[in-house]
Image (cartoon, rainbow, N blue to C red):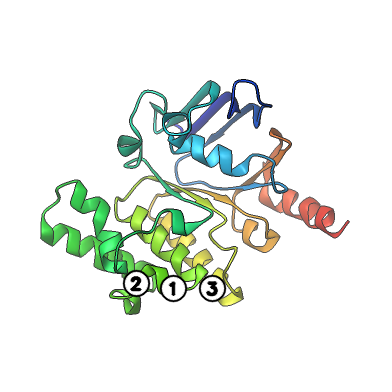
Amino acid sequence: MDAIVVDRLSYRYQAAGGQILKNISFKVAPGEIVALIGLSGCGKSTLCLCLGGIIPHYLGGELTGQVLVNGKDTREYRVAQLALEVGLVFQEPDTQLFAPTVEDEIAFAPENLCLPAEEVGMRVSQVLDTLGISALRKANPSHLSGGQKHLVAMGAVLALDPAILVLDEVMAQLDPAGKKRINGILADLRRRGKTILIVEHDPETVSIADRVLVLEDGRLIEDDRAVTVVGEWESMLRC
């Protein structure tokens, strides 16, 4: 079974508005890293919201076609249920962070699953260690840098141990060393069987992917091996 199936997906935020996504179809196999690239405003973040069920459950709008995550139709399951399948890290981490400490932020979701305190504590420690942010355990997320906030937001979704991760420009505010560390983390997560979709602009970051999807004006115009697409994308950015 494919981890992600998007079949003829189209979406508009308002019935009278223009389509943001236009007849998109693709599949992602379990354990694959796929990058999603395209210029600003092409629909990348909207597609991420569809994968996590935020669209249509919270934002409404008009959606046609189908989105399946681990075989579950996103229209037929609540967002809380889909969060156990798909960990979505938003482009703006402040929209996800609310707890007074990093530790509380990461513990929140497993606590709401009513897991035993010992299990919650183990998950928090494992996530902090995986992301290399154990020193931030007692820090207030609102006082962290943009890159650190993205790591905490990633930790909050990893605490649920979802099979699929959707990361919307999580490296945008990281320096080269931070990007290298995240690349290492993603490679490790793939070795653990995670399926990962990354939204990015940076060709260097995209190069860790197995495949690259290119969106243009809401349409999927390319789906190819990363080594092929990255060279084309770098040439486009230089124009």
Q: Is residue 52 above or below residue 106?
A: above
Quadrant in which residue 154 is drawn = bottom left
Please tell me whether mark 3 sits on a helix, a strand or a loop. helix
Say if residue 70 shows up in the picture. Answer: yes
Please tell me whether mark 1 sits on a helix, a strand or a loop. loop
Which residue is pictured at 14% across the width and 51% down the height?
Answer: 115
Residue bearing mark 1: 144
Which amino acid is tagged 3?
Gly
On residue 140, the disc is 2
Residue bearing mark 3: 178
On residue 167, the disc is none
Task: Evaluate if marks 1 and 2 touch, with contact meaning CB atoms under 8 Å apart.
Answer: yes
First in sequence: mark 3 vs mark 1: 1
Query: Quick check: 56 left or right of 175?
Result: left
Which residue is pictured at 42% across the width and 28% down the height?
Answer: 74
Inter-mark Cα distance, 2 to 3? 20 Å
Image quarter (top left, top right, bottom left or bottom right) of the N terminus: top left
